[in-house]
Image (cartoon, grey):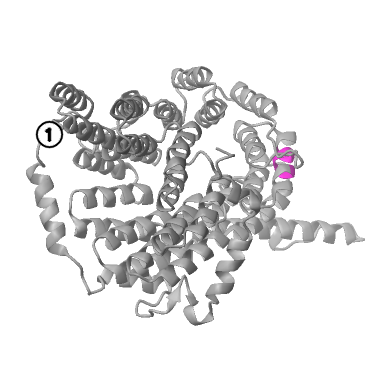
Amino acid sequence: KKRLKEICMRQSNYHEDNIIKGEGEAADNNGKKRRGAADKKIIFPVNDGRLFNAWAKMESKSGNLSEARKILRRGMELYPKDYTLLQAAGSIEERLGNIRSARKLYGASLAIEPSAPTLIAYALLELRSPIDIRTKASNVTMVRKLFEEALLIDPKHGPAYNAFGNLERRQGNTAYARQIYENGIKANCTDAPSVYHGLAKLHLSLGEVEEARDVLRRGLALFPTRENNTLVPRNENVAFLAHTLAMIDLNVNNNAKHAKEVLQQGLWHCRNSPQLLLGMALCESRLGNDNGARDMFEKSLMADQAHAQAWQAFGVMEMRAGNFRSAKLLFECGLKNSPTHGALWQAYGTLESWKGNVGTARILFAAGIEKCPHHVPLYQAWACLELQDGDVITAKRLIGEALTRDKRNGSGWLVAAQIEEKMDNHGLVGLILRRGIECAPGDAELYIALANHEISRGKIDSARELLEKGMEINPLHAPLYHSLAELEARVFNIEGLAKLNKRAAEIFQSDANAPPTDEALQAMRRQMKHGRSTKMPDGITALAEKIGVESDEPTTIAGVSMDDVDLDSLVNNVLCGFGGESAMMLQEGRL
């Protein structure tokens, strides 16, 4: 970075000296050439804006967007016909929220020379921030044409296939999206990992987990392994392929050991990837190695302090282990870096509710909603808090607002059903859960809840049908099998239990009735032995000091003193913002 800055400044000064020299010669009445330092011709590594682009990229990766903008503007003054500088400047303006400026810069770049990266950037801008402000609807036809033009200009441009396929997948054109991804693979793109990753995401969206795993393995096979070749340069593009494959192994197959192996291979190509390091931490935690998990969490956060998911996951691990002081400090650090990350507010509020600090939890949920009003789980968590505290009216208002904002979120319907059950409106419980299944047919927990409701009414056959339907929709959701097994055991259906066990063994590749393995038992013993720790780990304290958060200050929430917070005012301001529409969501007429 220092060397880049030095060369760019020399280029800039050299051009300025030439301008001054030209003005001096024009003012010389005798027509004699002036001699000076500017007469000396300097040869630079490149005579275009590439170095300015590289310098600006380094600054933007460090989060210095304003500095990157200054660098690119200086580069554009020196090289006004370099279309790559205009495209990079448009990207910076877009990240700063200046959509009009970004659109103008992309247009100017395309006017000089159409290129695939600029066309893709322009298309994605239209999808994120449509030109038509009135309808707020993206011009999908225009976006398609931009992607098609990008592929005509560069048929081997992997991100173009990926972005085009993602568009069609979101539009519901899965067959066409699959064809686009496969065309990209056949074209032998220069950035093939993005195409393989896009195709894997398509398979996952269709529930085709094995097909997705196969695609990701094919993508990873393009790159050498540490065992096969240590001389080939490492490639950062392997990171997201390895991360997705590892998360499938961890969360779908519950195979933390294999997920860890995949992540280690990915880290060989990209050793400082925050996502891969976070994945390693999750694997270590799942295997019961909390100390190893802490080391990985710390490495992930050292690589990227703004990685909100890492702060959240680290805090949740400490919270579940009973280390509430450590969890509080981690949530504080995360919110200082990412105050608009709703999941951090939710986790922090849940921690305080676990500790019995209902007022503090209320403040956190209300403050989180003010900062991130579109994070629906915050409303759900606050509603659960009020339900536990006995305030069903407030809970109903909150969950009504959550469902108004996103009726496709199955968890909201589950909470709504719990509220009605608490109010002894048993007739509404079944109606709400059925409405939830209509709005969120892919949420397996809704089928379990409705099946339990049917069992309570003695409707065993109806409950069985619901659980079997849930398994058809989401065959990898293990609690569905557990619930059906309990149902069959209740009615002494031995044949049904045997069939269910066989089906579960085929899908999960293990015996559903098998006891925990020795490795799992050892992990459980380590976790139980660890218990609650009153000592703050040195690594967490060091991270907090680096962020600038005090580890021994018990009266602060997200950097704000408790003494400065008016609880009633904050909560009322948030609740008063909910209109009558939300309160109507749970009434029988709307159902």
- Residue drawn at the location 33% of the way across and 61% of the way down: 315
Q: Kindly indicate the quadrant of the structure image that contains residue 318.
A: bottom left
* Main SS class of the magenta portion in the image: helix
The reply, left or right, for residue 3 in relation to residue 137 is: left
For the residue labelled by badge 1, is the local secondary structure a helix, a strand or a loop? loop
Whether 509 is drawn above or below 446: the answer is: above
Q: Kindly indicate the quadrant of the structure image that contains residue 81.
A: top right
For the residue pair 572 and 339, the one nearer the viewer reads as: 572
> What amino acid is at disc 1?
Asn
**Residue 105 forms part of the magenta stretch:** yes
For the residue pair 247 and 3, the one nearer the viewer reads as: 247
Which corner quadrant holds the C terminus? top right
Label 1 Cα neighbours within 10 Å, binned few <14 / some 14-19 / many ≥20: few
* Residue 269: x %, y % from top left: 32, 42
For the residue pair 443 and 436, the one nearer the viewer reads as: 436
Region rendered in magenta: 104-109
- Residue drawn at the location 35% of the way across and 25% of the way down: 469
* Residue 344: x %, y % from top left: 43, 59
The reply, left or right, for residue 451 in relation to residue 587 is: left
- Residue drawn at the location 27% of the way across and 40% of the way down: 250
Whether 128 is drawn above or below 476: the answer is: below
* Residue 60: x %, y % from top left: 55, 55
Write down the residue under mark 1. Answer: 513
Q: Kindly indicate the quadrant of the structure image that contains residue 490.
A: top left
* Residue 142: x %, y % from top left: 70, 28
Whether 282 is drawn above or below 481: the answer is: below
For the residue pair 464 and 568, the one nearer the viewer reads as: 464
